[in-house]
Amino acid sequence: MILNGSQIILECLLEQGADTVFGYPGGAVLNIYDALYGYSDKITHILTSHEQGASHAADGYARTTGKTGVVIATSGPGATNLVTGLATAYMDSIPVVAITGNVATSLLGLDSFQEVDITGITMPITKHNCIVKDVTKLADAIREAFFIANDGKKGPVLIDIPKDITAAKCEYEPQKPKEHTYSLDETEITEAAEIIEKSKRPFIYAGGGIVSCGAVSDLSKLAELIDAPVSLSLMGQCAFDNTSPRYTGMMGMHGTKTSSLALKECDLLIVLGSRFSDRVTCNAKSFRAATGAKILHIDIDPAEINKNIETDYKICGNLKLALEKLNKLLTPVRHNEWLEKIFAWKKAYPIYQTSSDKNAVLPQEVLETLYDITNGEAIISTEVGQHQMWTAEFYNFRKPRSFASSGGLGTMGYGLGAAIGCKVGNPDRVVVNCAGDGSFYMNMNELTTLAKYRLPVIELVFNNSVLGMVRQWQKLFYNNRFSQTTLEKPTDFELLGKAIGIEAMTIRTKSDIRPVLEKAVALNKPVLINCIIGKDINVLPMVPAGASIAEPILTIES
């Protein structure tokens, strides 16, 4: 059938299983939006307040549904506003397809109005990008974008389409999506099984790759088979039941003492779908020295193996397939003495927050109460900062695809846009975005998106009137010189909520925590919660930059 370029784009989206897009219209994508008008019964479009919010929404949608997020933006500033969102998705291996408009092909290279080389700009932060100058190649470009975004190590892909190509016509024939095929080195599998069976003190460290490839149940089975404790990265927070006795907490800069001790005393570290980032190793040399263990690294990306940490054994390939094969080879064993030591460390080194003020609101109590009220069933997104670490520490994630947070890029302003995508993709789940007041002021415009669509997302702001994480570093390493980290903005959150058209509440004392959270969840409406906390509440444990992961700081003097 003969279709124009815009219709081809939408038919290809449907062909690839996409039924939701996030975006913002503009001149260069007018043809696409005009065609979208006729597809409104098949494709839901969410209009955000800013293209960056749309890119984060597509990201949050992808993280919590397992589908590919799709975002549309116009040329020039519309396209460049996607850059931070694409970089965020790239660093965290999230499948997103971005469709940008550009000026007509006859105007390319002439510094035309709202012309920008978005493929050149985004080359380092996408798995692949291209500009389509021939309408007959448009369908294949979109199909390839979806395939690449989901093949191997996942990530974002951008397609730039000049305006005249969206209007040009050609023959379109639907196709089934191309399937992904993976293979494994059987020798690597056999060698890994042998070294695991010889281990007396195995320790599993898992990352976001477990969630990405759908291997959560396989990880749980492995831990049971080899009777091993499990630690997670920030990106892997919902890869393993946080309430399990086996769970030792996070590893790394803000990891638990139990995880650092387990790392030190294990004889085999099994690393699954994690890339040994500097926030985990803290110091690559001291990380390797902190453990005398052999390291088995399983990852789909060959570039990640031996990149940051030298490993002894590897399996390079699809993690789910690798774990399925390993689990079939392994014989169940028990390591009672090793697990008893783990349990003793967990009891000796709990993470908890205290205050001399009996009425002070502690983030731990807020998050633990939220967990209780939601039965651990909520989807939690976060911004970046202290609140992000507190969420990972104190909200017990039990199900996969329940957590959306910017791990690699550390994007303040990510969470609220992501929460929109989480809720659109999971309408029956409670969705809460945990924010700090610093991040909140970066993206509060997206509250208007919640109001427009009546999306029942809870925006929970831990308001300490400072840039908490940066201030914590200034306290420790800059002699309390709090340069530009004191915010103290006189915003009336309840009036702000009323002006925007959403519910707003305040948590001032301990006695407010449960009733406010219960009301916010029960309302099933968009809610803004101003949770007032002290500016000197720190994130602990903490390993200073460059220090050894084996020696985390457990206390900070006021």
Image (cartoon, rainbow, N blue to C red):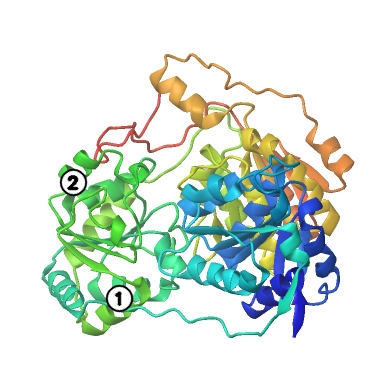
Across and down, in percent, residue 518 comes to 72, 55
Residue at screen point 65% across, 34% down: 437
x and y percent of residue 231 in the render? 34, 57
The vertical placement of 455 against 409, above or below, is below
User: Residue 391: x and y, percent?
Assistant: 53, 48
| Residue occupying the point 28% across, 81% down | 325
Q: Residue at x 26, y 48 (%)?
A: 308
Asked if labels 2 and 1 touch by Cβ distance under 8 angstroms, the answer is no
Horizontal side, residue 224 vs residue 15: left or right: left
Q: Position of residue 267 (x, y in %)?
A: 14, 58
- Residue identifier under label 1: 322
Estimate how packed mark 1 is, as few (under 14), some (14 to 19) or many (20 or more) residues with alpha carbons within 10 Å. Answer: many
Q: Which residue in the structure is indicated by mark 2? A: 288
Query: What amino acid is labelled 2 in the image?
Result: Arg
Residue name at image x 55 percent, y 67 percent = 145
Q: Nearer the viewer, residue 360 or 133?
A: 133
**Amino acid carrying mark 1 in the image:** Ala
Q: Is residue 216 visible?
A: yes
Which quarter of the picture shows residue 96?
A: bottom right
Give the side of residue 524 with respect to residue 304, left or right. Answer: right
Q: Is residue 317 above or below residue 383?
A: below
